Image (tube, rainbow, N blue to C red):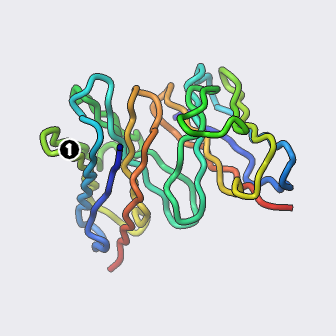
Amino acid sequence: DTVLTQSPALAVSPGERVTISCRASESVSTLMHWYQQKPGQQPKLLIYKASNLASGVPARFSGSGSGTDFTFTIDPVEADDIATYYCHQSWNSWTFGGGTKLELK
Amino acid sequence: QVTLKESGPGILQPSQTLSLTCTFSGFSLSTYGMGVGWIRQPSGKGLEWLANIWWDDDKYYNPSLKNRLTISKDTSNNQAFLKITNVDTADTATYYCARAPNWDYFDYWGQGVMVTVSS
């Protein structure tokens, strides 16, 4: 299985720029996707294929990377962005990262 | 408007078979490239992909659970199904179904259904 590693938590303040990383144990080309999940809700697709913004998602969200190293950026962060963010690869079977919980400073 | 809704037994006992149904609208599983997947999430933990089924009836399973999973579909009734055999407490989770429109990612998710395995 391709293992995706994310840092477990980050603390941010509204207005700041935040970057979340996802490292794959082997290359996944650009088949990396990002989801936002708020407590009690289902995940929501934000970025697909590394850098493509999903429909209706604000341009404050962006993604980049290829191969094994990927980043997801929110700039600027808003209070409503407090959530857990998951990366997901679909190059070698399908796997999710462990999630990065965004918290307020 | 794309919607998906999961349904299941709520609670079942260890060693039983879990049967889940995903009823969807706004798309067809007979459309080229379309798929539906199942993902689960134990309370307070991360997401685990379980299985996908595609428009051509191709099926893919999480290798670590493959021998316990069966995914299927009823295209005419806009439903997808997942069976998990021989459940135990580790299968207690919220189970989601989601649409995969172009082979690679999930763009719409259901609200999830909670399943508890307990004796």
Q: Residue at x 54, y 41 (%)?
A: A45
Q: Residue at x 80, y 40 (%)?
A: A75
Image quadrant where one finds the C terminus of chain B: bottom left
- Name the chain under label 1: B
Q: Residue at x 36, y 49 (%)?
A: B97
The residue nearer to you, when weighing A60 against B56, is A60
**Quadrant of the image occupied by residue A54:** top right
Q: Few, some or many C-alpha atoms within 10 Å of disc 1 (few <14, some 14-19, many ≥20)?
A: some
Give the x, y percent position of residue B5.
32, 56
Image quadrant where one finds the N terminus of chain B: top left
> Regarding mark 1 in the picture, which secondary structure is present there?
loop
Is residue B76 found left or right of A23 in the rendered image?
A: left
**Quadrant of the image occupied by residue B89:** bottom left
Q: Is residue B6 above or below residue A62?
A: below
Query: Farthest residue toward the left?
Result: B76
Is residue A45 found left or right of B85 in the rendered image?
A: right
How many numbered markers are drawn? Answer: 1
Q: Residue at x 57, y 26 (%)?
A: A49
Query: Farthest residue toward the bottom?
Result: B119
Is residue A1 found left or right of A78 in the rendered image?
A: left
Q: Is residue B57 above or below residue A97?
A: above
Give the x, y percent position of residue B110.
39, 53
The residue identified by callout 1 is: B78
Give the x, y percent position of residue B72.
21, 42
The residue nearer to you, when weighing B12 against B111, is B111
* Amino acid type of the residue that numbered disc 1 sits on in the rendered structure: Asn
Give the x, y percent position of residue B50.
39, 46
